[in-house]
Amino acid sequence: MTKVKLALCQMNVIDDKEENLRKAGLMIGEASENADFIVLPEMFNCPYSNDKFVEYQEEEKDSHTLTEIASLARENSVYILAGSIPEKESGRLYNTSYLFDRKGEIIARHRKMHLFDIDVKGKITFKESDVLTAGNEFTIAETEFGKIGIGICYDVRFPELARVMVENGALILFYPGAFNLTTGPAHWELLFRSRALDNQAYAVGVAPALNRNASYHSYGHSIVANPWGEIVAMASYEEELIFAEIDLNEIKKVREELPLLKNKRKDLYEVILK
Protein backbone atom coordinates (compact mmCIF):
# COMPACT_ATOMS: atom_id res chain seq x y z
CA MET A 1 0.00 0.00 0.00
CA THR A 2 1.69 3.21 -1.17
CA LYS A 3 -1.01 5.75 -0.34
CA VAL A 4 -1.83 6.67 3.24
CA LYS A 5 -4.80 8.73 4.32
CA LEU A 6 -3.78 10.80 7.34
CA ALA A 7 -6.03 12.67 9.76
CA LEU A 8 -4.56 15.24 12.14
CA CYS A 9 -6.70 15.99 15.20
CA GLN A 10 -5.87 19.52 16.29
CA MET A 11 -8.06 19.42 19.37
CA ASN A 12 -8.64 22.05 22.03
CA VAL A 13 -7.16 20.58 25.21
CA ILE A 14 -8.67 21.78 28.48
CA ASP A 15 -8.23 21.08 32.21
CA ASP A 16 -10.63 18.13 32.20
CA LYS A 17 -9.31 14.68 31.27
CA GLU A 18 -12.71 13.13 30.59
CA GLU A 19 -13.73 15.97 28.33
CA ASN A 20 -10.42 15.74 26.47
CA LEU A 21 -10.96 12.02 25.93
CA ARG A 22 -14.52 12.64 24.79
CA LYS A 23 -13.30 15.22 22.27
CA ALA A 24 -10.54 12.90 21.05
CA GLY A 25 -13.14 10.17 20.58
CA LEU A 26 -15.42 12.43 18.56
CA MET A 27 -12.58 13.58 16.30
CA ILE A 28 -11.30 10.03 15.84
CA GLY A 29 -14.79 8.84 14.99
CA GLU A 30 -15.19 11.54 12.34
CA ALA A 31 -11.66 11.04 11.01
CA SER A 32 -12.04 7.26 10.68
CA GLU A 33 -14.58 7.72 7.90
CA ASN A 34 -11.83 9.04 5.62
CA ALA A 35 -8.48 8.08 7.15
CA ASP A 36 -6.25 5.07 7.78
CA PHE A 37 -3.91 6.75 10.23
CA ILE A 38 -5.07 9.24 12.86
CA VAL A 39 -2.76 11.40 14.96
CA LEU A 40 -3.50 13.20 18.23
CA PRO A 41 -1.45 16.09 19.67
CA GLU A 42 1.21 16.13 22.37
CA MET A 43 -0.40 15.93 25.83
CA PHE A 44 -3.84 15.49 24.29
CA ASN A 45 -5.43 14.46 27.60
CA CYS A 46 -3.70 17.07 29.74
CA PRO A 47 -2.96 20.81 29.85
CA TYR A 48 0.64 21.57 28.94
CA SER A 49 2.15 22.54 32.29
CA ASN A 50 4.42 20.78 34.75
CA ASP A 51 1.90 20.74 37.58
CA LYS A 52 -0.73 19.17 35.31
CA PHE A 53 1.72 16.52 34.09
CA VAL A 54 2.00 15.40 37.70
CA GLU A 55 -1.76 15.62 38.32
CA TYR A 56 -2.76 13.75 35.13
CA GLN A 57 -0.06 11.05 35.21
CA GLU A 58 -1.02 7.46 34.39
CA GLU A 59 0.80 4.14 34.41
CA GLU A 60 0.69 2.20 31.18
CA LYS A 61 -0.55 -1.02 32.79
CA ASP A 62 -3.81 0.52 34.02
CA SER A 63 -4.11 3.70 31.94
CA HIS A 64 -7.68 4.87 31.42
CA THR A 65 -6.54 7.02 28.51
CA LEU A 66 -4.76 4.19 26.68
CA THR A 67 -7.70 1.84 27.23
CA GLU A 68 -10.00 4.37 25.59
CA ILE A 69 -7.71 4.92 22.60
CA ALA A 70 -7.18 1.17 22.15
CA SER A 71 -10.96 0.73 21.95
CA LEU A 72 -11.29 3.53 19.41
CA ALA A 73 -8.56 2.05 17.21
CA ARG A 74 -10.16 -1.39 17.35
CA GLU A 75 -13.75 -0.20 16.84
CA ASN A 76 -12.82 2.01 13.88
CA SER A 77 -10.11 -0.29 12.46
CA VAL A 78 -7.55 2.52 12.17
CA TYR A 79 -4.04 3.23 13.28
CA ILE A 80 -3.91 5.86 16.03
CA LEU A 81 -0.80 7.67 17.17
CA ALA A 82 -1.90 8.81 20.61
CA GLY A 83 0.03 12.08 20.67
CA SER A 84 1.46 11.88 24.14
CA ILE A 85 0.41 11.56 27.77
CA PRO A 86 2.22 11.97 31.09
CA GLU A 87 3.29 8.37 31.73
CA LYS A 88 4.62 7.17 35.08
CA GLU A 89 6.87 4.19 35.59
CA SER A 90 9.03 3.27 38.61
CA GLY A 91 8.55 6.67 40.17
CA ARG A 92 9.60 8.57 37.04
CA LEU A 93 7.41 10.65 34.76
CA TYR A 94 7.77 10.63 30.97
CA ASN A 95 6.19 12.45 28.04
CA THR A 96 5.15 9.37 26.09
CA SER A 97 3.52 8.64 22.74
CA TYR A 98 1.79 5.35 21.90
CA LEU A 99 1.05 3.86 18.49
CA PHE A 100 -1.97 1.55 18.18
CA ASP A 101 -2.67 -0.72 15.23
CA ARG A 102 -6.07 -1.46 13.72
CA LYS A 103 -6.69 -4.14 16.36
CA GLY A 104 -6.11 -1.71 19.21
CA GLU A 105 -2.74 -3.22 20.14
CA ILE A 106 0.18 -1.01 21.20
CA ILE A 107 2.89 -1.57 18.60
CA ALA A 108 5.28 1.25 19.57
CA ARG A 109 6.05 3.61 22.44
CA HIS A 110 8.20 6.73 22.29
CA ARG A 111 9.36 8.65 25.33
CA LYS A 112 10.34 12.22 24.48
CA MET A 113 14.11 12.15 24.08
CA HIS A 114 14.91 15.87 24.27
CA LEU A 115 13.23 17.75 27.11
CA PHE A 116 11.92 21.25 26.51
CA ASP A 117 14.11 23.42 28.75
CA ILE A 118 14.18 26.92 27.30
CA ASP A 119 14.43 30.55 28.39
CA VAL A 120 13.64 33.10 25.69
CA LYS A 121 14.16 36.31 27.63
CA GLY A 122 11.00 38.34 28.10
CA LYS A 123 8.88 35.85 26.17
CA ILE A 124 8.76 32.28 27.47
CA THR A 125 10.46 30.09 30.04
CA PHE A 126 9.69 26.39 30.44
CA LYS A 127 11.63 23.55 32.04
CA GLU A 128 10.19 20.10 31.46
CA SER A 129 13.11 18.49 33.29
CA ASP A 130 11.70 19.84 36.57
CA VAL A 131 9.23 16.95 36.49
CA LEU A 132 9.91 14.82 33.41
CA THR A 133 12.62 12.27 32.63
CA ALA A 134 14.04 12.01 29.11
CA GLY A 135 13.57 8.84 27.09
CA ASN A 136 16.58 7.04 25.64
CA GLU A 137 15.12 4.92 22.84
CA PHE A 138 14.82 5.51 19.11
CA THR A 139 11.32 4.62 17.93
CA ILE A 140 10.86 3.14 14.48
CA ALA A 141 7.65 1.16 14.05
CA GLU A 142 6.49 -1.34 11.43
CA THR A 143 3.07 -0.67 9.91
CA GLU A 144 1.21 -2.01 6.90
CA PHE A 145 2.36 1.12 5.04
CA GLY A 146 6.02 0.65 5.89
CA LYS A 147 8.20 1.93 8.69
CA ILE A 148 7.49 5.18 10.53
CA GLY A 149 9.56 7.17 12.98
CA ILE A 150 8.18 8.85 16.10
CA GLY A 151 9.50 11.85 18.02
CA ILE A 152 7.77 14.37 20.25
CA CYS A 153 7.80 18.16 19.84
CA TYR A 154 11.29 19.40 20.81
CA ASP A 155 12.71 16.20 19.26
CA VAL A 156 12.03 17.72 15.82
CA ARG A 157 14.80 20.28 16.38
CA PHE A 158 17.46 17.57 16.33
CA PRO A 159 18.27 16.51 12.76
CA GLU A 160 20.43 13.63 13.96
CA LEU A 161 17.37 11.90 15.44
CA ALA A 162 15.43 12.22 12.18
CA ARG A 163 18.39 10.91 10.19
CA VAL A 164 18.77 7.87 12.44
CA MET A 165 15.08 7.04 11.98
CA VAL A 166 15.27 7.44 8.20
CA GLU A 167 18.49 5.43 7.94
CA ASN A 168 16.59 2.67 9.75
CA GLY A 169 13.83 2.73 7.15
CA ALA A 170 11.31 5.31 8.35
CA LEU A 171 9.30 6.82 5.49
CA ILE A 172 7.14 9.13 7.61
CA LEU A 173 8.37 11.10 10.61
CA PHE A 174 5.66 11.89 13.15
CA TYR A 175 6.12 14.54 15.84
CA PRO A 176 3.11 15.28 18.04
CA GLY A 177 4.04 18.70 19.42
CA ALA A 178 2.94 21.87 21.16
CA PHE A 179 5.06 24.80 20.02
CA ASN A 180 4.07 28.13 21.56
CA LEU A 181 3.35 31.62 20.26
CA THR A 182 7.04 32.54 20.42
CA THR A 183 8.70 29.51 18.85
CA GLY A 184 5.75 28.49 16.66
CA PRO A 185 5.61 31.43 14.23
CA ALA A 186 9.41 31.48 14.03
CA HIS A 187 10.27 27.82 13.62
CA TRP A 188 7.36 25.34 13.37
CA GLU A 189 6.81 25.32 9.60
CA LEU A 190 10.52 25.75 8.91
CA LEU A 191 11.45 22.72 11.03
CA PHE A 192 8.92 20.35 9.50
CA ARG A 193 9.78 21.37 5.97
CA SER A 194 13.47 21.04 6.83
CA ARG A 195 13.17 17.57 8.36
CA ALA A 196 11.17 16.43 5.33
CA LEU A 197 13.63 18.00 2.89
CA ASP A 198 16.77 16.83 4.74
CA ASN A 199 15.60 13.24 4.77
CA GLN A 200 13.43 13.12 1.66
CA ALA A 201 10.59 11.74 3.73
CA TYR A 202 7.21 12.94 4.94
CA ALA A 203 7.17 14.93 8.20
CA VAL A 204 3.98 15.32 10.22
CA GLY A 205 3.37 17.57 13.21
CA VAL A 206 0.14 17.56 15.24
CA ALA A 207 -0.47 20.20 17.90
CA PRO A 208 -3.26 21.20 20.25
CA ALA A 209 -5.38 24.15 19.16
CA LEU A 210 -4.70 27.56 20.67
CA ASN A 211 -6.54 27.89 23.98
CA ARG A 212 -6.26 31.47 25.24
CA ASN A 213 -7.59 30.39 28.64
CA ALA A 214 -4.70 28.00 29.23
CA SER A 215 -1.42 28.94 30.91
CA TYR A 216 0.51 27.66 27.89
CA HIS A 217 -0.59 28.89 24.46
CA SER A 218 -0.15 26.29 21.72
CA TYR A 219 0.58 27.59 18.24
CA GLY A 220 -1.56 24.95 16.54
CA HIS A 221 -0.82 24.84 12.79
CA SER A 222 -0.68 21.03 12.53
CA ILE A 223 1.26 20.23 9.38
CA VAL A 224 2.22 17.67 6.75
CA ALA A 225 5.33 18.29 4.63
CA ASN A 226 6.38 16.16 1.65
CA PRO A 227 9.83 14.88 0.59
CA TRP A 228 10.36 17.96 -1.59
CA GLY A 229 9.89 20.19 1.45
CA GLU A 230 6.46 21.43 0.39
CA ILE A 231 3.44 21.81 2.66
CA VAL A 232 0.76 19.26 1.82
CA ALA A 233 -1.69 20.42 4.51
CA MET A 234 -1.65 22.83 7.43
CA ALA A 235 -4.19 23.94 10.01
CA SER A 236 -4.62 27.38 11.59
CA TYR A 237 -4.80 28.21 15.31
CA GLU A 238 -8.29 26.85 15.91
CA GLU A 239 -9.60 23.39 16.70
CA GLU A 240 -9.63 21.58 13.40
CA LEU A 241 -9.52 18.16 11.79
CA ILE A 242 -7.37 18.14 8.69
CA PHE A 243 -6.82 15.36 6.16
CA ALA A 244 -3.96 14.59 3.81
CA GLU A 245 -3.49 11.69 1.42
CA ILE A 246 0.20 11.04 0.92
CA ASP A 247 1.85 8.82 -1.68
CA LEU A 248 4.94 6.96 -0.46
CA ASN A 249 6.05 6.48 -4.08
CA GLU A 250 6.88 10.19 -3.96
CA ILE A 251 9.78 9.36 -1.62
CA LYS A 252 11.38 7.00 -4.13
CA LYS A 253 10.88 9.51 -6.94
CA VAL A 254 12.51 12.38 -5.05
CA ARG A 255 15.40 10.23 -3.83
CA GLU A 256 16.12 9.11 -7.40
CA GLU A 257 15.99 12.65 -8.77
CA LEU A 258 18.07 14.20 -6.00
CA PRO A 259 20.02 11.35 -4.34
CA LEU A 260 21.05 13.10 -1.13
CA LEU A 261 21.14 9.96 0.98
CA LYS A 262 23.33 8.18 -1.58
CA ASN A 263 25.62 11.17 -2.00
CA LYS A 264 26.54 11.42 1.69
CA ARG A 265 30.29 11.23 2.37
CA LYS A 266 30.21 8.27 4.74
CA ASP A 267 33.98 8.14 4.49
CA LEU A 268 34.16 11.56 6.16
CA TYR A 269 31.24 11.71 8.62
CA GLU A 270 28.49 9.68 10.20
CA VAL A 271 25.89 9.72 12.96
CA ILE A 272 27.14 7.40 15.70
CA LEU A 273 24.70 5.69 18.06
CA LYS A 274 25.75 5.20 21.68
Image: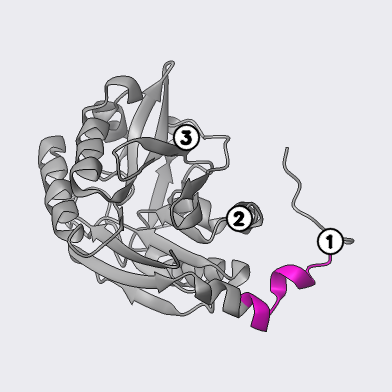
- The answer to whether mark 3 and mark 2 are in CB contact below 8 A is no
> 192 left or right of 15?
right
> What residue is rendered at 38% in x and 40% in y?
98
- Circle 1: element type: loop
Q: Quadrant of residue 17?
A: top left
- Circle 3: element type: helix
The 10 Å Cα crowd at callout 2, few under 14, some 14 to 19, many 20 or more, is some
> What residue is rendered at 88% in x and 61% in y?
268
The amino acid type of the residue labelled 1 equals Lys
Which residue occupies the extreme right position in the image?
267
- Residue 71 at x, y percent in the picture: 20, 37
Residue 266's tag is: 1
Is residue 250 on the magenta stretch? no
The 10 Å Cα crowd at callout 3, few under 14, some 14 to 19, many 20 or more, is some
Residue ID for mark 2: 169
- Residue 72 at x, y percent in the picture: 20, 43
Q: Nearer the viewer, residue 6 or 51?
A: 6
- Residue 33 at x, y percent in the picture: 17, 61
Question: Which marked residue is nearer to the observer: mark 1 or mark 3?
Answer: 1
Q: Nearer the viewer, residue 220 or 162?
A: 162
Which residue occupies the extreme bottom position in the image?
257
User: Which mark sits nearer the N-terminus, 1 or 2?
Assistant: 2
The amino acid type of the residue labelled 3 equals Ser
> 211 left or right of 231?
left
Specify start and end residues of the magenta stretch as a single range. 255-266
Visible residue check, residue 270: yes
> What residue is rendered at 15% in x and 47% in y?
25
User: Which mark sits nearer the N-terminus, 3 or 2?
Assistant: 3
User: Which mark sits nearer the N-terminus, 1 or 3?
Assistant: 3
- Asked if 136 appears above or below 36 in the picture, the reply is above
- The answer to whether mark 1 and mark 2 are in CB contact below 8 A is no
